[in-house]
Amino acid sequence: MKKAFLTGLLIFTMIFTTVGQEGFAAKAGFNNVSISVDTDGFFDASDSELGFFIGGGYNFEASDEFDIEPSLLFSFVDDLTSLYIPIMAKYKISEQFNIQAGPQINYLLEDLPDGEFGLDLAFGGGFQIDSNWFVEARYGIQISRGGDFGDVVDINTLTIGGGYRFN
């Protein structure tokens, strides 16, 4: 199952990066992954780890005020390597500023018995420096995680980074 998923992901990435280069963006930055464990109705343990992410996205202009941007981001922290697929709706406050919100699928790339897939609600903002360069920050709150693992673990993520959009 894992090999099929990673093969599909590789094909998706190759297609994603070759279609319509005008909206493709390369992204990288820092992230902070917070993990909370709740075994008996009370949070028993909590930890936060710093790391980095790298990936890309494609910006679709829905209207003058709204954009939709799906992305594929790999997150690397000491004990938890993950794949994030945010699908952000962006509302343009001005030519340079936008606010973002949307679902974010995450997949833990570690060897875990259950609960690899999760769904987050992500929100944040972005600033367009010029026609190519941008910065953005986003916070993802876990709303569900599959399997028994999801019943006791909450994983939330803060990402701060930038990127270059190929026009």
Image (cartoon, helix red, strand yellow):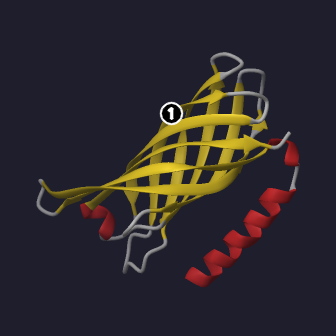
User: How many badges with numbers are in the image?
Assistant: 1
| In-image side of 24 versus 29 (left or right) | right
The quadrant the C terminus occupies is top right
Q: Classify residue 115 as left or right of residue 41.
A: right
Q: Secondary structure at mark 1?
A: strand
Q: Is residue 74 visible?
A: yes
Residue 2's image quarter?
A: bottom right
Residue under the point 77% across and 35% down:
132
Q: Residue shown at 61%/83% (left/top)?
A: 3
Q: Percent position (x, y) of residue 113?
A: 37, 80
Please give the residue where the numbered disc 1 appears in the rendered image.
124
Q: Is residue 34 left or right of residue 42?
A: right
Residue type for callout 1? Gly
82 versus 52 height, above or below: below
Q: Position of residue 108 (x, y in %)?
A: 46, 68
Quarter of the image that includes the N terminus: bottom right
Residue 1: tell me if it is visible.
Answer: no
Residue sitting nearer the eye, 39 or 135: 135
Image x and y of residue 166, in percent: 82, 43
Q: Quadrant of residue 136?
A: top right
Label 1: how many Cα within 10 Å (few below 14, some 14–19, many 20+): some
Q: Is residue 82 above or below residue 65?
A: below
Q: Where 158 falls versus 74 (above or below)?
A: above
- Provide residue 79's location: percent of width, then percent of height: 37, 69
| Residue drawn at 82 percent across, 63 percent down | 15
